[in-house]
Image (cartoon, rainbow, N blue to C red):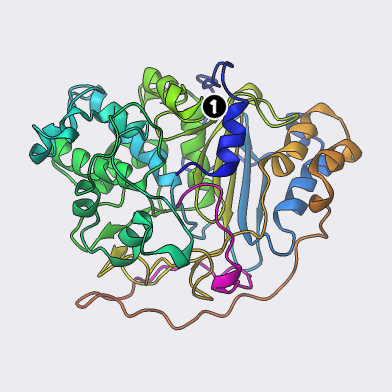
Amino acid sequence: MLPVAFVVLAASLVGPAPPVAAGPGPVPGADWAVESPAAHGMDPAVLDQARAYAFADGRNTQGVVVVHGGAIVAEWYAPGASADAYAASWSMAKSFTSALIGIAIARGEIPSIDVPMSTYYPDWAGTPKGAITLRHVLHMESGLAWNEDYDPTGLGTSQVGQMVALEADQLAFAASRPAEVAPGTRFNYSSGDTMLLSGVLQQATGMPPEQYAQQVLFAPIGMSKVEWWRDAAGHTLTYCCLDTTSRDFARFGLLYLRGGSWNGTQVVPAAWVDASVTDTAASYGGYGYQWWLDPSGAGVVPPFFSAQGHDGQFIYVIPSLDLVVVRNGTYVKSPCPPVADPTLLPYYPPSGLVPGQGTVPPDSWSDRAFLTPIVQSFTGAGGGAAREAMGAAAEPAAAPGSTRAAQAALAPCPAGSAPTSATAPLSPATAPSAAAVVTPQFTG
């Protein structure tokens, strides 16, 4: 299902070339360099308007990290959170999964981007699903029947809702979806498509995707605090639920800004990075290999690409400014092991459905309103111009100093497991009722 906002955006995207990675440049070591905005030619007062927008009452922001030239130039957290707090990915995990596919192809573990998916799902051979390739799945053009609807009242017709809330073996559920149209003829955003990549990576590499990621992606770029959730059958949830810090999400964005290179090592092939941020015709120019594209930019914001997740998780990459910006929303992490046993919903409730648990969405969010003052902090356009671009909704008071949210009674951990010792600090939020949940622009 194409969100209305995406259809409107897509109409303006036909034609322009997609943004491309900036190429080699400085990256952090074990610790980030933290430098002043002024040292990077940025006006701190204008930049601070992004903080004011993100942390206004109701926006439920947990953390923001702004990286320029490979250094952190601004970093803000809600009371009760910190640079060490776990943040949620929801569908930002899809972009990580895409990176793993590119790495596996480069290593010869996957033969090519056009390998038939029946190589990994042999019962598809000789059926209408036999024509689906890995490329089709990465582009969300598999043609499989799927409804990506996040309205909690529509569980009966939403496949993503059913997968999250009812399925113990989420990979089997995704693989069981029937063919609906010919592959390559329709863009249909589908977490089921990305879940299929869990089975591809497991079979191709001989290890669970989260273990493979630790070896070939997380460790090489210094991501040191990561948990990637699995379903009850042990399959990595490649479509979602990679928990790490906002700083480590920024590392991943910086890796793509650097064309896949990290301190002299080509972690992700440069050609794969370029292909990942190249549009596909069926998506009207707005989607690559599990990355969202905005080659026209947003007002004064130059062209960018982004990883996006439910309840307002974003990694924005703006190559022309050598800039990465991360925004994570309120997340109260379960103390249990990262296993969706029997299903994901009790441990990772979205949309503020369970007060004091899971993730909470912003009551409103605008990429343009948030990014404009960050961009204008370089140009010296001044606070008045930034505020005009942000609009009336972006005239917040300073970040509220509310107390930490009360944590609701947690679902018991799966039998035989114990709570983990490290949980995220609670971030302040007043969770909305189910009736007040705002349908997200993009997926979880």
Is residue 339 covered in magenta?
no
Taking the spot 44% from the left edge, 83% from the top edge, the residue there is 409
Up the image or down, 49 lies above or below 344; here it is: above
In this orientation, does residue 260 appear?
no
Determine the residue positioned at 35% across, 41% down: 219
For image coordinates 49% across by 25% down, the residue present is 258
Q: Nearer the viewer, residue 33 or 226?
A: 226
User: Looking at this rendering, what residue extends furthest in the bottom direction?
Assistant: 409
Q: Give the secondary structure at mark 1.
A: loop
When asked about the image quadrant of residue 71, the answer is: top right
Q: Position of residue 185 (x, y in %)?
A: 35, 27
Instruction: Give the x, y percent position of residue 426.
Output: 55, 70
Q: Amino acid at mark 1?
A: Pro
* Residue 149 vertical position relative to residue 287 in the rendered view, above or below: below
- Residue 222's spot in the image, x, y percent? 41, 41
- Where, by quadrant of the figure, is residue 352 drawn? bottom right
Residue at (83%, 60%) from the top-left corner?
A: 397
Q: Quadrant of the N terminus?
A: top left
Residue 443: percent from left, percent from top: 47, 49
Left or right of residue 401, residue 171 in this image: left
Q: Which residue is mark 1?
A: 26
In the displayed structure image, the side of residue 315 where residue 98 appears, left or right: left
Magenta stretch in the rendered image: 420-444
Magenta stretch: dominant secondary structure: loop
- What is the count of numbered marks? 1
Name the residue nearer the viewer: 253 or 393.
393
